[in-house]
Amino acid sequence: MRKFLVVLDDSRECLNAMRFAAMRAANTGGGVAILSIIPPDEFNHWIGVGEIMRAEARERIEAHFEVFAKWMRDKQQLNPELVIREGEPLVEIMNQIKEDPEIGVLVLGAGTDNKGPGPLVTQLVRQSGSLPIPVTIVPGDLSKERLEAIT
């Protein structure tokens, strides 16, 4: 089964990327893998404090994931999988793609402010010629209706 890999973060555009990935997967018989990455600099504290912070970060990610997962199960009849990795986002995305041969498309949301599409989109576009899978960049301000029509 081909999976759509989508990155879960706190950005507004993440919502459209999730919707797009879920609707495309539902319409093509695929699946969705949701990747959340905990940056390494979040835990540069004493060992005990770092472990507590790591556990709290995982709890936040799982709660955030459950909101999207419920929508995907209820509306798209999909059961997404959650993958949590720690490290640099670009490195961990590439590692996940290499480790899971079922991932066929990476879906990212593009920011809509005047700062550009976002650091992850910018980094991946620079490397797009050498990526092992296609990347779909979903505009952050695309309406739900337009997303449904496209997918």
Image: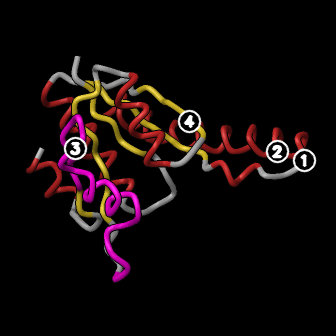
Q: CA distance from mark 2 to mark 3?
A: 35 Å
* Precedes in sequence: disc 4 or disc 2: 2
Q: Which mark is residue 125?
A: none
Rendered residue at 52%/36% (across/down): 66
Disc 4 and disc 2 in contact, CB within 8 angstroms: no
Q: Is residue 129 magenta?
A: yes
| Dot 4 alpha-carbon crowd within 10 angstroms: few under 14, some 14 to 19, many 20 or more | some
Disc 1 and disc 2 in contact, CB within 8 angstroms: yes
Q: CA distance from mark 4 to mark 3?
A: 23 Å
Q: Which mark is residue 46?
A: 1
Q: Position of residue 125 (x, y in %)?
A: 25, 57
Could you tell whether 53 is left or right of 136 in the image?
Answer: right
Q: Secondary structure at mark 1?
A: loop
Disc 4 and disc 3 in contact, CB within 8 angstroms: no
Q: Which residue is mark 3?
A: 130
Seen as rendered, the residue at the extreme front is 130
Labels 2, 3: front one: 3
